[in-house]
Image: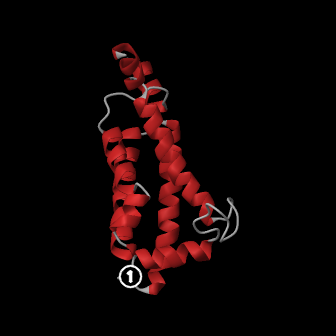
Amino acid sequence: MRKLLSRLARHDTIYLRLALAAGFLTAVTDRFGLWGPPGTTNVAWGDWSHFLAYAAVLNPELPASWIAPLGWLVTAAEISLSLALLAGFHTRAAALLAGLLLFLFALGMTIGTGVKSALNASVFSASAGAFLLARAQAYPWSLDGWRSARSS
């Protein structure tokens, strides 16, 4: 059992990178309707306008004119971070930024809809996982690992 756990621990950063990237990419593709239209089972938004309406709920203190730019900013951040995490490119920085972004999502969900929705979506857990990923010593199967091996 100990040997199995040791073997798994060597690859836990790969799992974290893939899980975080998948979460971001699933959310992005949902807001562009790739999982189906609004109202479809397991579809959170289904289109951009439903996503922006939800963003407004999570950010009630912001002027309405800021919601669309915020939506685009968050979407660009999620795409960029997911690609960096998938490739393992500047993983430490990408994981730290992902942890911050997820924490801000959790905070927004807590303010806008209550803490239970943030807990149900496991956003706090994902944020914590991203922060742990940022502290990892090595990133196997990544561009960072490849660059590190080449420079040694």
Q: How many labels does the image show?
A: 1
Horizontal and vertical percent position of residue 142: 48, 30
> Mark 1 packing: few (<14 Cα in 10 Å), some, or many (20+)?
few
Q: Position of residue 143 (x, y in %)?
A: 49, 31
Specify the farthest residue to the top. 3
Q: Is residue 7 above or below residue 53?
A: above
The kind of secondary structure element at disc 1 is loop
Residue bearing the label numbered 1: 60
Q: Which residue is drawn at 41% across and 40% down?
A: 90
Residue 94 place in picture, x, y as percent: 40, 46
Q: Is residue 136 above or below residue 101?
A: above
At x 52%, y 60%, the residue is 76
Residue 132, placed above or below residue 139: below
Question: Does 124 sit left or right of 24 as displayed?
Answer: left
Image check: 1 left or right of 50?
A: left
Quadrant assignment, res 36? bottom right
On-image quarter of the N terminus: top left
Instruction: Residue at 66%, 71% (x, y): give it.
Output: 38
Inspect this view and state whether residue 4 appears.
yes
Q: Residue 113's spot in the image, x, y percent?
A: 39, 74
Q: In which quarter of the image is residue 62?
A: bottom left
Tell me the residue at 32%/33% (across/down). Answer: 136
